[in-house]
Amino acid sequence: MLKFDEMYTRLPYEFFTHGAKIREHYKIYDAWLARQPGDMMAKRREEAEMIFRRVGITFAVYGEKDEEGAGTERLIPFDLIPRIIPAGEWAFLERGLVQRVTALNRFVHDVYHAQEIIKAGLVPPEQVQNNAQFRPEMMGVDVPNDIYSHISGIDIVRVPNAKGEGEYYVLEDNLRVPSGVSYMLENRKMMMRLFPDLFNANRVAPVAHYPDLLLETLRASSPATTAEPTVVVLTPGMHNSAYFEHAFLAQQMGVELVEGQDLFVKDNFCYMRTTRGPKRVDVLYRRVDDDFLDPKAFRPSSTLGCVGLLDVYRAGHVSICNAIGAGVADDKSIYAYVPRMIEFYLGEKPILSNVPTYLCRKPDDLAYTLANLKDLVVKEVHGAGGYGMLVGPAASQAEIEDFRQALLANPGGYIAQPTLSLSSCPTFVESGIAPRHIDLRPYVLAGKTVQMVPGGLTRVALKNGSLVVNSSQGGGTKDTWVLEI
């Protein structure tokens, strides 16, 4: 299988050769690294871990308990070697991301209105109607600017082509409650603290203004009933795995962090309880899944939402970001139709390619998948976090057979894709500097315009040879540098 490394033109690595076999955009970094004493990286890593722990930059792992029965809090491992992207490559990615998110928003609006793409025969009706994230309560509901996914996390991978050159592909669209942006911001702050001289030597585009762009996007989604919208972040609470991020973003934007119990509905408007009395809420940046937003409309047992919220939303008196029902477009079986969406709604060819995908609900695709399980990656259409997934080349025969039975029992619940040789990036591990596979999650903001900060969250699979980058599966993160020239 061909390999592509972001820094070195050939593998295995040949270190400290004064720029030889180093990609052009890494040469300044390589020369800097060659000048450092041998123990510098280990000391800096210890310093980073100490600071992250002191600040409380952690995530919880569901299902794991400590000795006292409480959930475990972990630091996401942070790697000190940045992933560097040249300006031209980023410009290409940005064009493709704007195009893709624009088409996805057009699709979600169409699903809940005229369903023209279904009538045109480009997306099967059952793919929408049988989708667990389809919300019939949203049919005919108009939302500000026709935007449903205000914050999209688009997972991108780079793989080698037949010539061994790197090409970008979209692996997944996250349109419900994409997480991880706080680590993007904190990673940059850490790198600037530990290595200020690197930022003097490299023209690295800033990302610190992301909270300002996020607040601008949220305010732009406000109902027309107010000129000065009140924005809040709705969290499930401190026991949620991403609670640090919820609190961090609220603090960075200068808005209130609320839980469902802090909200109530009166006269078809949403209010939050404050020490000065009720205050009307215009925009909810929700980090709570649809099912839990309103016990009156969805799951009656939910204590995380606000009774009557859907009625206020449907009346146009509050905006919810991302919109209820936006998840209909980030189902892994819908992913295969995004290139068609781009051509149908925008009249353009896709800039960013999809990974070839087999829809196991189709008999021919199922037959191919069953015959080639040892070579494919098989995913649950509603799976997330690296769970519910088979990586055929790394799986045991027993795991392959278990998945075979699951596929036969519920073929519509799975897709399959070829096993990609994700690009690698030098990573500081216990044995020294070694290649580890990475992906990239840029965060795309859609308000009155579609915009993003230059970069995103680079996730890295720290286990040698692993292709699974998710933090819940032992992955770490890197700072992502987009060069300005």
Image: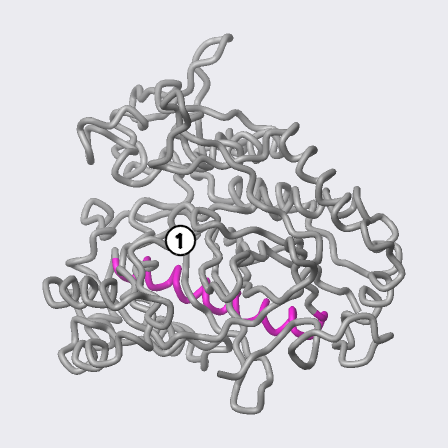
Is 199 part of what is drawn in magenta? no
Q: Nearer the viewer, residue 239 or 273?
A: 239
* Residue at disc 1, secondary structure: loop
Whether residue 377 appears in this view of the structure is: yes
Image coords of residue 327 (percent x, y): 32, 52
In the rendered view, does 289 fall on the left or right side of 350?
Answer: left
Residue neighbourhood size for the residue with mark 1, other residues' Cα within 10 Å, grouped as few (<14), some (14–19), many (≥20): many
Q: Which residue sits furthest bottom?
A: 163
The residue under label 1 is: 175
In the rendered view, does 449 fall on the left or right side of 33?
Answer: left
Image coords of residue 162 (percent x, y): 52, 90
Is 87 part of what is drawn in magenta? yes
In the rendered view, does 460 fall on the left or right side of 198?
Answer: left
Magenta span covers which residues? Answer: 86-111
What's the residue at 34%, 26% (across, down)?
A: 269
What's the residue at 41%, 60% (across, down)?
A: 173
Query: Which quadrant of the view contains residue 333?
Result: bottom left
What's the residue at 76%, 81% (across, down)?
A: 21
Image coords of residue 409 (percent x, y): 10, 63
Q: Say above or below: 174 vs 115.
A: above
Task: Look at the image and tell me in which quarter the C terminus lies.
Answer: bottom right
Which amino acid type corresponds to the residue marked 1 in the rendered image? Leu
- The kind of secondary structure the magenta stretch mainly shows is helix
Whether residue 449 appears in this view of the structure is: no
Image coords of residue 253 (percent x, y): 60, 34
